[in-house]
Amino acid sequence: LAEEEAERIHSASLQVERSINLSNLDDWFNKQKGTEKPELSLILKTDVRGSLEALTDSINDLKSDRITAKIIHGAVGEVTESDVVLAHASNAIILGFHVRVMPGINRLAKQKGVDIRLYSIIYELLDELKEAMRGRLPPEVRETPLGEAEIIQIFNISKAGRICGCRVNNGVVRVNAKAKVFRDKELIYHGHVQNLKHFKDDVKEIRAGFECGIRLDNFEEFEVGDRIEVFSVTQVLPEL
């Protein structure tokens, strides 16, 4: 029985793939390439017409200047082979509300890499849809200040090159942390902390109130009085 079901689904899938108007899909992809505002394509399946209409209105009301959620197919009933094939061809997510997915359809979706998400509460569907929309956008890079040091002396070491002797004025300076060097208000370097020394010892970090030697990656053009800002970088999902 399992083999017969798999063969039936495979045959139905091939028939649906043949029936899809590929020229329309090509037009859709060409439009995607030509627009700066990306779209998240959706296939929406619900248990009753009222739910379909309510969810369609709610999804269309999701406003964003950066991305659009677009329902390319919506219908009442369980998720079918044609839904999976269309989702695969158009890179869409299938959203099901109070509907079921038969085991054979689940297997087909996994084979084609199609994401099927099932819900029984409207606000959970909408909340996760917003997160999916954010996930399609490029992440935002955020800088978090860690500390600041001032160059008070410069050491010329034969094997190590120029090392800046610094006083940490606030926060903490860490090895491998991102670093910017400012001369007055001008940014003259953007890189990272390669090495830290406290007296003759290599250390991982130096806190405010202490002096240390700082080696910056691929940069030796510093002068006494330059200011080093140290920070961490994280990537976060952007807001809609």
Image (cartoon, helix red, strand yellow):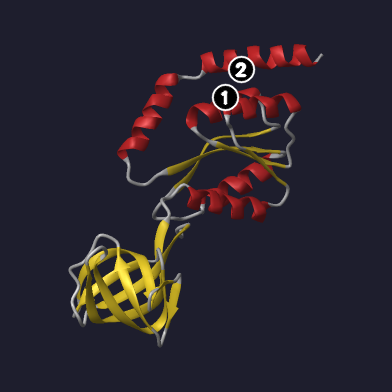
Observer-nearest residue: 140 or 24? 140
Query: Mark 1 is on which residue type?
Result: Val
- Residue 120 spot, x, y in % from top left: 73, 48
At horizontal 41% and vertical 58% (from top left) the residue drawn is 140
Which residue is the site of mark 2? 13
Note whether residue 125 is visible: yes
- Residue 176 spot, x, y in % from top left: 40, 63
* 59 is higher (above) or lower (below) than 77: below
* 39 is higher (above) or lower (below) than 170: above
Residue lying furthest right in this view? 1
In the structure shown, which secondary structural element does the residue marked by tag 1 occupy? helix
Which residue is the site of mark 1? 85
Q: How many discs mark residues in the rendered view? A: 2
Mark 2–mark 1 CB contact (< 8 Å) = yes
Determine whether, in the image, residue 87 is placed left or right of residue 154: right
* 187 is higher (above) or lower (below) than 238: below
Query: Mark 2 is on which residue type?
Result: Ser
At horizontal 39% and vertical 55% (from top left) the residue drawn is 65
- Residue 155 spot, x, y in % from top left: 23, 75
- For residue 222, the mark is none
* 189 is higher (above) or lower (below) than 60: below
Neighbour class for label 2 at 10 Å: few (<14), some, many (≥20)?
Answer: many
Observer-nearest residue: 70 or 240? 240
Q: Quadrant of residue 77?
A: top right
Observer-nearest residue: 127 or 55? 127
State which tag comes first along the sequence, 2 or 1. 2
Cα–Cα gap, marks 2 and 1: 7 Å
Neighbour class for label 1 at 10 Å: few (<14), some, many (≥20)?
Answer: many
